[in-house]
Image (cartoon, rainbow, N blue to C red):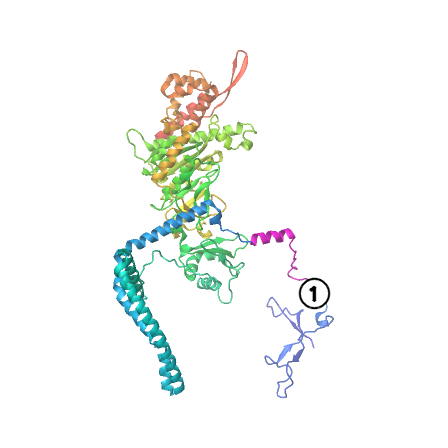
Amino acid sequence: MTETTTFTPSGDPEDTEQPTAAIVPFPLKKTTDPDPTAPSEGVVKPGEWEAELPDDADSPEIEGLTEGAPVDPPREVYPPSVAEWMEARDKARLPVLPDWVKLPDQRTAVRKWAIRHYSAVVGYHALRLPCIYTPKILFYSPRGAWRWSAAVGRWVFDAEGRSLRVAAVAAGDAGEYMMLSRQRNDRVRLRGIVAVIVGLIGLPAALVLYVMAPSWVLLLAVATLTTTLGAAGAPVDRPLIDRAKVTFRKRRLSSDIVIRAHEASKLTNKDQSIAFPRPIGRDGDGWRVVVDLPYGKTFEDAVNAHARLASGMDIAPTQLFLDKDETSGRRVSYWIADRDPLAVPSGKSPLLGATRVDFWKPFPWGVDERGNPVMATMLWLSLLVGAVPRQGKTFSARTIALAAALDPYVRLYVFDGKASPDWRKFTKVAHRIAFGIVPKNGFDPVVHLLTSLRELKADVEDRYHRLSELPLHVCPEGKLTPEISRDKKLNMPLTLFVVDEVQEYLQHPEHGKEILSLLVYLARVAPAVGVSVMTATQKPDDKACPSELRDQHQARFALRVGAYQVSDTILGAGSYSEGLDASKLLKSHKGVGILKGMSDDAGIVRTYLANGRDAESILTRAAALREAEGTLSGDAIGEAAAPEVSATILDDVAAVLGKGEAKVWSETIVDRLADLRPAIYGAWAELKPKPKAEALTAALKPFGVATDQISRRIDGRQVNKRGIKRDDIATAITERNKKRDAG
């Protein structure tokens, strides 16, 4: 019978007019035979009754219901084609010879390793032979002689069967004992005869050897016998020969170990484990493990548990590397190294053997944690390098500058705020170079940096203007090309502007603000026209290196730092959550850092080493290469800074403007300037009309003075040339004076 009840959602007891639910009991059936003592109908005990659902689809209880569509779509299985099957078989086939046999560079590396390894082992033991091994042998040889003679005596008199004979006597088994006794007597008789024969032959042989053999043979025989007896008498826990190399901890990784590590890291539990989408296997000098974390866990959770995961696998944290999988938020790829790969030097820079470098192409900068080469490029970007002192920051940045030096068509600007010897040899090739912040012998390095920055800013602005005017077949889409950058007439080479210890210049009391402004401009705008900026600092905080400059660098390289916050400051906010933390690097990881932004992937780079002598060798070759190509310029050949960055040029231009002249052609101004100051502007006057006008344009741009087309009628014909306006010069002088007064 159907019982109807009412329900009032509002909770009002008076609102009971309409029924809203009907209770229909399921028919019940017994699961066991009827029991006379069972409770009355309607009272059900657990386990005795179960609901009986109707089997007939036409039953009134399920009338109107239809079967729904499957939740999961059917899996479509496509048989592989013959080509796909053959390709899969080809990929599964192992190479006949390993790479180290087929590749010349690999064979060379293996040969060098073998020579280095075995020469070290031989030298190690040769040094210890007279002072350690020989005394040990002499000390242990009497014990060895006793052990050897005792072993021979036990063998001759069948000592190994004594326990069986004693057991037979204890058991009262006369037959067994007699059999064992006869066997023992036979063995002793035979072994005794063998021992006597050996003694009769050995003793005369020893006497003959002593009397007739050369002394060196006698010494060799005595040394061999003594060594054998010493090895026999050496204690088991103290070996006679020391190990010449350390055996690294290397164990086979299993799924149980990986699961244990995730349980210890609280990333999973007994009821919710991880999955392995592919088998665990070797990957270089380590193991590759790909896991699917439980649903709800992410790559960021694994990054936060990095130290606990390493502990759960019983390895050092520097042996565990995490990679994100873009196909799933819960999939993590681990690489577990057999030993700390970051403490292994990456070796000498390949630039030592390079005749020249094409800076338009990636060049070798280092290797990753698995030893794979890492190629760097400075095209269309700026690079920030940061680290605590003495971690290889300068050497890492200098390797990039050395690669640029080996391309004769790359213009180099090098400034070192700490005036160390690391960059001194770049005077051979650098267009502009200076060291430190203290003036010396009438030369102010900070002013020289400021002058160079103004010069470069004017060059960048001029490049944008000229690239936009070049024909499309020469400059497609208005962008710099290798051909344009190597055309000396166009004068737009690839340029690398290097500032090491940039914080020293940014904190300069007089010029710091302007240097910051110019660096921000160049880092943001200049890479698009082939001018790259690389700054290095050991103080990446907002005070020493403001964020407005750091944020303009598209690429970041962080060597070891003190805290993850500093790592995030160098690499960019959010890098720590991506698993990028340079504070986890150790002091022994010199020249090792995390690279981000130079390519789509971020990761570890162990930069190649080029010490001072190597750098000098490379730069000597680079200077000769540039001299042969005719690309040495600026400070490298003693050319003074262009006068366009001199503050007096505004006054000089104003001085040569005639009364009532509102507009004057640029080439006319240059001729007048050459008459006014021949030592400074004389070289401009010797140029052709167009380069002459461009020189004045570049000189005035840092002061906000632009050139315009000025029309003149000459011999009845209208002539247009670029020139300047008197009002623009007057405005620039006024603004300059205001800045001076404010300073």
- Coordinates of residue 491 in the picture (x, y in percent): 46, 27
Q: Quadrant of residue 61?
A: bottom right
Does residue 67 appear left or right of residue 616 in this picture? Answer: right
Q: Residue at x 50, y 30 (%)?
A: 484
Identify the secondary structure beneath mark 1.
loop
Picture layout, residue 132 above or below residue 434:
below
- Coordinates of residue 73 in the picture (x, y in percent): 65, 59
Does residue 529 appear left or right of residue 235 in this picture? Answer: right
Whether residue 572 is visible: no
Q: Nearer the viewer, residue 622 or 491?
A: 622
Point out the residue furthest to the right here: 58
Point out the residue furthest to the top here: 715
Q: Quadrant of residue 743?
A: top left
Q: Nearer the viewer, residue 513 or 298?
A: 298
Q: Residue at x 65, y 56 (%)?
A: 79
Q: Which residues are magenta?
A: 67-92
Question: Quadrant where the N terminus lies?
Answer: bottom right
Q: Quadrant of residue 617?
A: top left
Picture layout, residue 27 above or below residue 80:
below
Q: Mark 1 highlights which residue? A: 67
Q: Nearer the viewer, residue 87 or 515?
A: 87
Q: Is residue 118 magenta?
A: no
Q: Nearer the viewer, residue 196 or 17?
A: 196
- Coordinates of residue 268 in the picture (x, y in percent): 48, 63
